[in-house]
Image (spheres, rainbow, N blue to C red):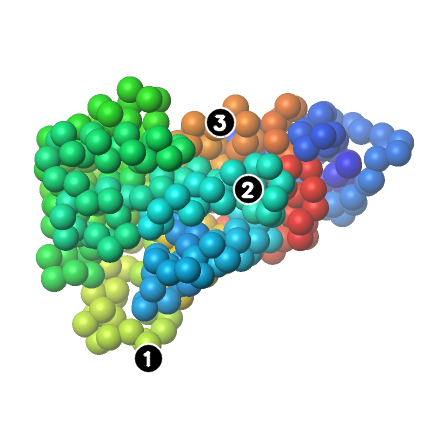
């Protein structure tokens, strides 16, 4: 397959070139002749890497009643959500909590061609303290030794990342208070690093953010109540921030279906997140895109709306592009495979109608989605 008459945009820069695809990979970027290859005329469109979403929940039905889908329908729902994701321009996802090995197995099914979907980097079960955030679907563990064991269990299942619930939810009565101790977080990082597996930490409040960053996690998710100290902790420890701005905005979009208490908290969180974007940019915190798709009314396949929000909250379009491609690939440890339009890389590509460097909303205007060299939408 050859993509012609398009402008390539990635973190390497902007250039006019054809993209020649063979056996699911980019064979050449330059001038390509048709021959017997299928030729797609981009007609002045923009060829970009597929979005990498670093925070999703594929088992979820996206409703407040059953966010992480701990029921018998989760297998089928996961397959449907993967299909919606890939058709929505998301070519790789990092899944950060499922009640068992469901999503790990789904990733294997994508790899061997059994079902369509994005590449999946899954944690299996998240790890929380007894009664902690999402204790119903997470692996509960208390104390450093038990946390190490829980980490090893997930890696044995096939987890490619470890997820820790370092704090409560911003919407709980404790509003993001720290729930895992520094010793427990450090034990998780130590156990995962011995196997070369990265660690992500759910952290909403300042104390948990700082503890997670200083303990050496690779990314901190959400950071809704971050302050200057939290920003410095992420920057000094080279941890990525995964913003998940869309989750709170979706609650505001359905005021008739959300409790008054949650609605008020969501309004406050949205304003806080705008400040956090400014604060983290000021301190040079690196950002990797993540939508938290699977939370209430935050549907799979609509993930690129997160990129538009990142821009609306103050990030420039170059930073949004980098967060959704190069940075996200680096966080997932697959920067030699995806995230760029380069020779030898997987042919996970989008053709957009408009220039994403002019308006991040153009990520939603897709002419074509190519995954592993196959046209999927």
Q: Nearer the viewer, residue 124 or 119?
A: 124
Q: Earlier in the sequence, mark 1 or mark 3?
A: 1
Q: Residue at x 22, y 76 (%)?
A: 260
- Crowdedness of circle 1 by 10 Å Cα count: few (<14), some, many (20+)? few
Tell me the mark number nearer the camera, choosing from 1 and 2: 2
Q: Quadrant of residue 35?
A: top right
Q: Quadrant of residue 121?
A: top left
Q: Residue at x 82, y 40 (%)?
A: 38
Q: Earlier in the sequence, mark 1 or mark 2?
A: 2
Q: Residue at x 54, y 31 (%)?
A: 338
- Residue found farthest to the bottom: 256
- Residue found farthest to the top: 194
- Rendering coords of residue 200 (x, y %): 29, 37
C-alpha span from label 1 to label 2: 38 Å
Q: Answer whether labels 3 and 2 touch (C-beta < 8 Å).
A: no
Q: Earlier in the sequence, mark 3 or mark 2?
A: 2
SS at mark 2 in the image: helix
Q: Quickly name the residue at label 2.
A: 109
- Crowdedness of circle 3 by 10 Å Cα count: few (<14), some, many (20+)? some
Q: Quickly name the residue at label 3.
A: 335
Left or right of 165: which side holds 79? right
Does the image show residue 312?
A: no
Tell me the mark number nearer the camera, choosing from 3 and 2: 2
C-alpha span from label 1 to label 3: 42 Å
Left or right of 269: which side holds 156? right
Q: Quickly name the residue at label 1.
A: 256
Q: Answer whether labels 1 and 2 touch (C-beta < 8 Å).
A: no
- Crowdedness of circle 2 by 10 Å Cα count: few (<14), some, many (20+)? some
């Amino acid at each position: 397959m050859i993509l012609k008459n398009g402008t390539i945009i990635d973190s390497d820069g902007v250039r006019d070139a054809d993209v020649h695809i063979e056996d699911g990979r980019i064979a050449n970027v330059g001038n390509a002749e048709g021959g017997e290859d299928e030729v797609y005329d981009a007609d002045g469109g923009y060829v970009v890497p597929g979005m990498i979403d670093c925070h999703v929940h594929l088992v979820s039905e996206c409703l407040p009643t059953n966010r992480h889908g701990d029921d018998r329908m989760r297998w089928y729902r996961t397959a449907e959500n993967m299909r919606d994701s890939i058709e929505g321009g998301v070519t790789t996802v990092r899944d950060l909590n499922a009640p068992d090995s469901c999503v790990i197995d789904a990733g294997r099914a994508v790899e061997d061609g059994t079902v369509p979907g994005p590449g999946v980097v899954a944690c299996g079960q998240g790890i929380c303290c007894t009664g902690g955030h999402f204790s119903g679907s997470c692996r509960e563990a208390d104390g450093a030794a038990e946390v190490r064991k829980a980490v090893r269990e997930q890696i044995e299942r096939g987890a490619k990342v470890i997820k820790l619930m370092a704090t409560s939810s911003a919407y709980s009565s404790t509003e993001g208070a720290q729930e895992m101790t520094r010793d427990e977080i450090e034990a998780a990082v130590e156990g995962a690093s011995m196997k070369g597996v990265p660690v992500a930490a759910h952290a909403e409040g300042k104390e948990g953010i700082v503890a997670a960053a200083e303990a050496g996690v690779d990314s901190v998710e959400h950071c809704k109540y971050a302050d200057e100290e939290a920003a410095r902790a992420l920057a000094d420890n080279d941890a990525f921030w995964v913003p998940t701005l869309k989750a709170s905005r979706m609650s505001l979009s359905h005021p008739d279906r959300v409790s008054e208490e949650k609605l008020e908290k969501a309004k406050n969180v949205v304003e806080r997140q705008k400040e956090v974007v400014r604060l983290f940019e000021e301190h040079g915190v690196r950002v990797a895109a993540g939508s938290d798709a699977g939370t209430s009314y935050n549907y799979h396949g609509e993930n690129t709306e997160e990129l538009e929000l990142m821009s609306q909250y103050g990030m420039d379009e170059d930073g949004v592009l980098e967060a959704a491609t190069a940075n996200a690939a680096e966080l997932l440890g697959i920067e030699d495979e995806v995230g760029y339009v380069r020779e030898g890389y997987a042919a996970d590509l989008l053709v957009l109608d408009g220039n994403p460097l002019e308006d991040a909303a153009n990520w939603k205007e897709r002419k074509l989605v190519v995954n592993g060299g196959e046209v999927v939408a």
